[in-house]
Amino acid sequence: MMYEAALLAGAGLLAGAMNALAGGGSFVSLPAFLAAGVPSVSANASSTVALYPGGVASAWVYRDGLRQVGDVSLLHSLLITVAGGIVGALLLLATSNAAFDRILPWLLLVATVVLALGPRLGAYLRQHYRAGPMAVLCIQFALGVYGGYFGGAVGLMMMAAWSLLDGADVKQMAPARTLMVTGANTIAAICFAVAGAVSWMPALLLGAGALLGGYAGAWLGKRLPAGLVRGGTLLIASAMTIAFFIRVYA
């Protein structure tokens, strides 16, 4: 029991820091919940709830650096992200554990590939295509759905998608990304709690670590080189994606 508690708290610390730095904290928190014996859909819901306080702490630290992405105001982006989060959360609650187990590795793979290719592809697309406000809102709604359905790597997906629309680097986009993810997670966490999908004791243990990690990660995020942050996140994402494919299909 003590080992399990230490595992969850330690995973929360690392996951909270990762979310603050570049996203992808659920690459750590989700395996920790599964290792603690929590079923996959409940593990994903519990991960969203557990990482929520850390996201709020990160958003508070980053509040002075908020900037809009593309031609859409920050408020409109936030509202459409929250709307998508509602849809995604309801979709997750309607998914069986068996189905989610098989979908999960592919969601991780998509997030990892987009993270890896996003900067190069983004530079190319920005030379040939200009995304208007409607396109930005549609992308943000889809990201909200993704975040509500699968909290894992939504921050990475958001950064990767934004790299196609905006020339800013990872550090410049971090404040807005943290706010959007927190917005989607707010409504998703409420849906999961009301539906009784949260395993509260493991979530509280991991959440305590995530709160500290989220604050510390945001503090580090202002000081670490963007390349180091992105490289470390990509390494962890790749390792966890491979591990989940082996878990499900090997």
Image (spheres, helix red, strand yellow):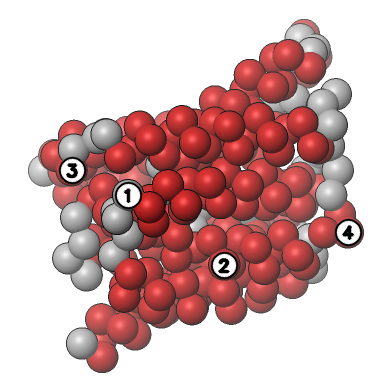
Q: Mark 3 points at which residue?
A: 97
Name the amino acid, label 3.
Asn
Kindly identify which residue carries mark 4. 64
Indicate the secondary structure of the residue bearing disc 4.
helix
Q: Percent x, y for residue 58?
A: 68, 64
Q: Name the residue under label 1.
A: 195
Left or right: residue 97 versus residue 62 is left
How far, Cα to Cα, is label 4 from label 3?
40 Å
Residue name at image x 63 percent, y 47 percent: 183
Which of these two is toward me, 66 or 128? Answer: 66
Question: Front-most of 164 and 207?
Answer: 207
Marks 1/3: CA–CA distance: 15 Å
Closer to the chain start, of discs 2 and 3, is: 2
3D distance between C-alphas at marks 2 and 1:
20 Å
Give the left or right position of residue 222, taking residue 201 as reference. Answer: right
Say which quarter of the image contains residue 10: bottom left
Query: Quick one: quadrant of the N terminus?
Result: bottom left
Say whether marks 4 and 3 touch (CB < 8 Å).
no
* Label placed on residue 53: 2
User: The residue under label 4 is which amino acid type?
Assistant: Asp
Q: Which of marks 1 and 3 is in front?
A: 1
